[in-house]
Image (cartoon, rainbow, N blue to C red):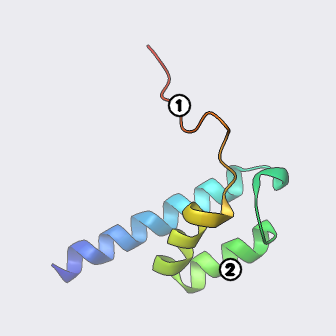
Amino acid sequence: MPFLFSILVIVLMVGALVDIIKREDSQVRFLPKMAWIVIVILLPLIGGLLWFAIGREYSEAGLRIPRM
């Protein structure tokens, strides 16, 4: 069980880092991108959760799934 939790934390951290790096500066809230990167690296679980909860700018329409 601790192994699964560790994998999930790593996936969350990597996902947050990729999302931060790919976003434009105008889509990042509250802190500069570099500060978010440092937070996510130093505090992977809390930093990743904070990024997706408050640091990221979501569109007005919400998340969209592309149609095929």
Q: Position of residue 54 (x, y in %)?
A: 63, 65
Q: Secondary structure at mark 1?
A: loop
* Residue under the point 50% across and 64% down: 14
Q: For the residues carrying marks 2 and 1, which lies nearer the camera in this image?
A: 1
Q: Position of residue 32 (x, y in %)?
A: 82, 69
53 or 17: nearer the eye?
Answer: 53
Residue furthest out toward the top: 68
**Label 2, residues with CA under 10 Å away: few <14, some 14-19, many ≥20:** few
Q: What numbered label is drawn on residue 19? A: none
Q: Is residue 66 above or below residue 37?
A: above
Residue furthest out toward the front: 60
Is the Cβ of the residue at disc 2 closer than 8 Å to that at disc 1? Answer: no
Q: Is residue 62 above or below residue 38?
A: above
Q: Which residue is mark 1?
A: 64
Q: Which residue is mark 2?
A: 38
Identify the image quadrant of the N terminus.
bottom left
63 or 16: nearer the eye?
Answer: 63
To which quarter of the image does residue 12 belong? Answer: bottom left
Residues at marks 2 and 1, CA–CA distance in whole angstroms: 29 Å
Horizontal side of 45 relative to 61 (left or right) equals left
Residue furthest out toward the bottom: 42
The kind of residue tagged 1 is: Arg
The kind of residue tagged 2 is: Val
Horizontal side of 63 relative to 57 (left or right) equals left
Sequence-earlier tag: 2 or 1:
2
* Residue under the point 77% across and 72% down: 34
Horizontal side of 28 relative to 37 (left or right) equals right
**Label 1, residues with CA under 10 Å away: few <14, some 14-19, many ≥20:** few
Identify the image quadrant of the C terminus.
top left
* Residue under the point 84% across and 52% down: 26
Residue furthest out toward the left: 1
